[in-house]
């Protein structure tokens, strides 16, 4: 059973494991003051061309989101997110548990627009309601789409005009930045948003996320907030080593390019067999729409999530590739799909949404 369920089924890239072994017996400071974390922070700042940015290394995505958002907002302030946003759908109410309401609006292929945000901002205007203060977006989105430079600029301009913070969940940011149709560099992203994080867990690391704080008003006291939320790792070297490796010799981007290429191969092969998709993705998440009979057969050999019911006979499934995805397994999935078509002998085009 080969898994296309996620991009963290494997452990870590060999270069990271090798460096962890090589440095294992060296004594270092803890809590982010080790030489490896200092090097990782320096490398990230250099790639962003933003020497004044604060960079904090945390363990996981949900922890990063709740630690950051709870630190950035006053008790009565709220977050606006797309209905598909990870903080709304997949984090067990972590943001609300810190006392901050998540207000959702419809997205366009998973992306927020100023037109969708504005009715909420315009409506909640007095002391009887929560005050929207932070716009949360994911890049790539939860359905694999990415924001263009112009879309980010529009959101930035809107946030500036209305006194809002713009925050990016970058759990798969490397995949977005490596997508063929991406026109945003990491330095341009850092210049347009107030804070974002760079996912390591889904980019070849064992674990870890790098939170980047660009807005000066959000920096003060953040390490104390990390400590309070249990997000400050004593053996911080374990994070520092991993991000030092990911940001050396283009490794993180090389791994993301491989993941994207495997997803593109999957998408192209599925499309050639006549199937459509929930959204057009150029990152490492693919959402083909398949007949239920096909899905049941595929699940006998492959692991993946059934994502969204389309109608009584079809659902969209999510296939995710990673830095470690074997091209032979991608081709095996496509060959299995082809064999299922032949076996079931469905010729009615109505089953192909």
Image (cartoon, helix red, strand yellow):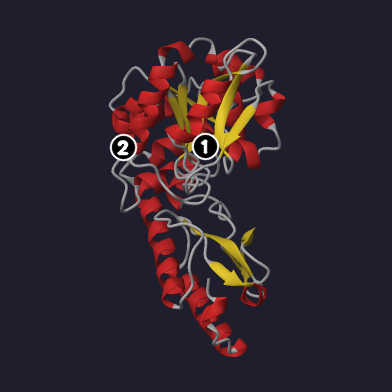
- At mark 2, the secondary structure is helix
Q: In the rendered structure, are the residues bearing label 1 and label 2 in contact, judged by CB atoms less than 8 Å apart? A: no
Image position, residue 132 (x, y; %): 56, 21
For the point 51% across and 42% down, the residue is: 107
For the point 41% across and 48% down, the residue is: 175
Name the front one of labels 1 and 2: 2
The residue to which callout 1 is attached is 24
Q: Reply above or below: 126 against 334.
A: above
Q: Reply above or below: 325 against 16.
A: below
Q: Is residue 31 visible?
A: no
For the point 51% across and 22% down, the residue is: 32
Quadrant assignment, res 120:
top right
The residue to which callout 2 is attached is 150
Q: Reply above or below: 275 against 223.
A: below
- At mark 1, the secondary structure is loop
In front here: 295 or 205?
295
Which label's residue is closer to the chain start, 1 or 2? 1
Residue 187 left/right relative to 242: left
Residue 64 left/right relative to 197: right
Residue 93 left/right relative to 269: right
Residue 297 left/right relative to 279: right
């Amino acid at each position: 059973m080969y898994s296309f369920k996620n991009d963290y089924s494997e452990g870590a890239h060999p270069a990271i494991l090798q460096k962890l072994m090589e440095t294992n017996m060296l004594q270092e400071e803890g809590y982010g003051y080790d030489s490896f974390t200092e090097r990782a922070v320096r490398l990230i700042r250099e790639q962003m061309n933003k020497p004044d940015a604060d960079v904090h290394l945390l363990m996981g995505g949900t922890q990063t989101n709740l630690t950051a958002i709870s630190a950035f907002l006053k008790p009565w302030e709220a977050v606006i997110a797309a209905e598909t946003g990870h903080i709304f759908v997949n984090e067990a109410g972590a943001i609300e548990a810190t006392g901050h309401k998540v207000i959702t609006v419809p997205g366009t292929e998973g992306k927020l627009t100023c037109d969708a945000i504005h009715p909420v901002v315009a409506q909640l205007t007095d002391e009887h309601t929560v005050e929207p203060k932070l716009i949360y977006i994911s890049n790539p989105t939860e359905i694999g789409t990415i924001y263009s430079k112009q879309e980010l600029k529009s959101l930035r301009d809107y946030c500036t005009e209305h006194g809002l913070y713009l925050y990016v969940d970058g759990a798969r940011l490397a995949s977005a930045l490596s997508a063929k149709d991406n026109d945003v560099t990491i330095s341009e992203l850092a210049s347009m948003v107030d804070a974002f994080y760079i996912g390591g867990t889904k980019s070849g690391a064992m674990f870890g996320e790098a939170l980047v704080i660009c807005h000066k008003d959000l920096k003060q006291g953040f390490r104390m907030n990390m400590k309070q939320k249990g997000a400050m790792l004593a053996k911080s070297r374990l994070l520092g080593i991993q991000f030092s490796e990911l940001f050396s010799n283009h490794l993180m981007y090389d791994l993301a390019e491989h993941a994207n290429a495997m997803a593109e191969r999957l998408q192209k092969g599925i499309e050639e067999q006549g199937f459509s998709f929930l959204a057009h993705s150029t990152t490492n998440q693919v959402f083909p729409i398949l007949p239920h009979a096909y899905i049941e057969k595929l699940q006998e050999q492959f692991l993946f999530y059934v994502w969204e019911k389309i109608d009584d006979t079809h659902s969209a499934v999510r296939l995710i590739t990673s830095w470690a995805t074997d091209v032979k397994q991608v081709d095996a999935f496509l060959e299995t799909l082809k064999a299922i078509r032949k076996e079931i002998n469905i010729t009615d085009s109505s089953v192909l949404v």
